[in-house]
Amino acid sequence: MTTIFSSRRRHYVPIVSIFLIMLIMVALIVGMAGCGQPGIEYTPMIAAGRVHTVGLKSDGTVVAVGNNGDGQCDVDDWTGITQVTAGALYTVGLKDNGRVVAVGYDFYGQCDVGGWTDITQVAAGAMHTVGLESDGTVVAVGWSYDGQCEVDNWTDITKVAAGNLHTVGVKVDGTVVAVGENDYGQCDVGGWGNITQVAAGAEVELAKWDLF
């Protein structure tokens, strides 16, 4: 009887060990998925839509408050996010793998970003979304009645911004390009130089000059 029991126990211990190892591996995988890719720095930031506010936490997760009538605050399951931006009634997040996610109002296709890859920055206008690709080109989806999504020929772009109905880009040489509604001259940026950053409001343009 003793010999038979010992034999069974010798087989039982390795099985338990394998089971414990599997549990530890699963826990590590789940932990890594919740915290984003290791070694990537997640810089906290905020973004504001028409009536909702979005916050990016230091662990790559996202929070949102405000009007959620179109699901623009449904970001609880987002992980590995490096940047957030908010349109009028929708929210966009850039993931640490260069992919993009979006939730909220999508009547004009402004949330159709699931096929984007190698994106380094995103910007959201009222109803259009802009993505800067790693090679300096730009993509855009959504409402383009005023031409705000006509960025296919842009190259050497380092920063993008999206206003209500227009899109702005900073080029490698410090000059600026813009497309879209220009009723108030918000796209009259052709003479700008030494620009390092831009921001676009509803009908106004802001820029940061490189003075040195």
Image: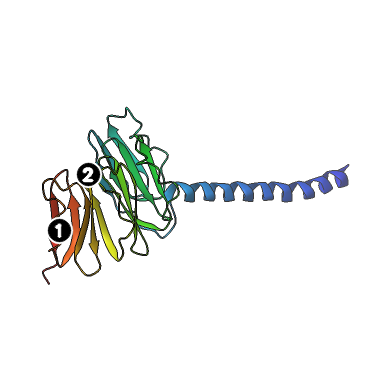
The answer to whether residue 56 shows anywhere in this view is: no
Q: Toward which corner of the image does residue 37 lie, by quadrant?
A: bottom left
Q: Residue at image x 32%, y 40%? A: 91
In the image, 4 versus 205, the foreground residue is 205
In the image, residue 26 above or below residue 71: below
Say what secondary structure mark 1 lies in. Answer: loop
Identify residue type, mark 1.
Val
Badge 2: few (under 14), some or many (20 or more) residues near its Cα, within 10 Å? many
Q: Which mark is residue 6?
A: none
For the point 48% across and 48% down, the residue is 33
Q: Tag 2's secondary structure?
A: loop
Residue 111 percent across, percent down from the top left: 37, 41
Answer few, some or many: residues within 10 Å of disc 1's Cα (few below 14, many 20 plus, some between 14 and 19). Answer: some
- Identify the residue at image location x=31%, y=37%: 90
Residue 86 percent location from the top left of the image:
28, 42
**First of labels 1, 2 by sequence position:** 2
Q: Identify the residue under disc 1.
A: 189
Figure disc tally:
2
Residue sitting nearer the eye, 152 or 124:
152
The residue indicated by pointer 2 is 165
Left/right of residue 79 with respect to residue 206 in the rendered view? right
